[in-house]
Image (spheres, rainbow, N blue to C red):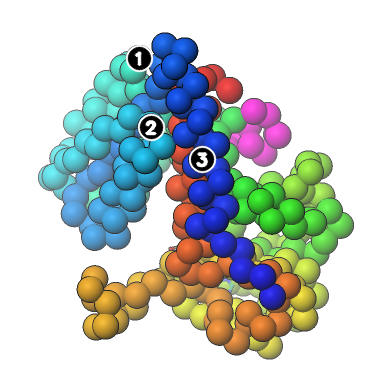
Amino acid sequence: MQILDGKLASKAIKEDLTNKILELKNAGKKIPHLAAVLVGNDPASETYVASKVKNCNEIGITSTLLRFNDSISEQELLQQIQQLNANPDVDGILVQVPLPKNISEKKIINTISPEKDVDGFHPLNVGKMVLDLPTFISATPYGIILLIQHYKIETAGKQVIVIGRSNNVGTPISILLSRNATYGNATVTLCHSRTKNLKELCLQADIIIAAIGKQKFVTADMVKENAVVIDVGINRIKDVTKKSGYALIGDVDFENVAPKCSYISPVPGGVGLMTIAALLMNTYKACVNY
Ligand code: NAP
């Protein structure tokens, strides 16, 4: 069994980007600039945004963090986004979700200029992704693809089960893996809460991608020998032994599933780190109009 080490794979991507950004700098060209928007004080969102900003700084991407009280109105936030759209120095805009209930995420995402939508959530970019046109692929599915590529995992002709059909993870990764591309050409089944015989389907899978949001949902009796298991889940559980007071665990019962796998991604240290690497890639691409 080999670990799909997100730390290792994201390090390689970050080193490559660091060099590319240095080249831009040395040539007197524009340096990528990410504007991250955070509304309110949700602890998980605070952690995610802080980590994204820290990673930008590490590799030479300029970052601006715009923080707003959760009392900000939808109209005010829309204006802030429009200002970022109009600012030629800003290449990428990221709005951390979830947003307060009085603000429509859909409206906010639709207002981000598609050319600066490094999260790849704008309907135009989602449409381009479906049609296999150049675009920003949203960070988590893109991160999974980068992890698969880093470890040279064969996907062509493989049976893939994706569990979870969310717009930001399950649905896009099922599309990406099924299309005619070097990391695609798989036969993908997209499962959800209404799927019948999930265990039987999983037992046939060469690759399982778990994006459910339920801790230890995928158990050893659902996984065939030598399968590849990619765990997207991030579930916070109380843990008094940790300084933060919580621990992160995935959607896969790692301890019991891992011995059966050829490859498995851990939580933390797997897809989460690749998601950030993918966001950095998108921000670089936004700057160089790649
Ligand atoms: P989501 O929007 O809550 O979707 C969950 C999906 O799981 C839904 O499609 C749901 O089916 C399905 N599901 C729920 N119970 C099920 C069951 N018993 N059997 C089969 N399917 C079931 O979740 P998400 O946003 O994709 O996130 C999933 C997990 O990934 C969460 O833990 C989240 O924190 C994590 N995540 C991690 C990253 C990262 O960077 N690593 C990024 C994004 C999300 P229905 O559609 O039928 O309700």
Q: Which residue is mark 2?
A: 60
The kind of residue tagged 1 is Pro
Q: Is residue 263 magenta?
A: no
Q: CA distance from mark 1 to mark 2?
A: 18 Å
- Residue 182 shows in this picture: yes
Quarter of the picture holding the C terminus: top right
| Residue 101 at x, y percent in the picture | 26, 52
Quick check: marks 3 and 2 in contact, CB under 8 Å? no
Is the residue 42 above or below the residue 25 in the image?
A: below
- Residue 91 shows in this picture: no
Q: Which residues are magenta?
A: 126-134
- Looking at marks 3 and 1 on the same chain, the residue that comes earlier in the sequence is marked by 3
Quick check: marks 3 and 1 in contact, CB under 8 Å? no
Quarter of the picture holding the N terminus: bottom right
Q: Which residue is mark 1?
A: 88
Q: Nearer the viewer, mark 3 or mark 1?
A: 3
In this rendering, position of residue 14 left or right of residue 130: left
Q: Which residue is mark 3?
A: 15
Is the residue 17 above or below the residue 199 in the image?
A: above
Point out the residue furthest to the right here: 157
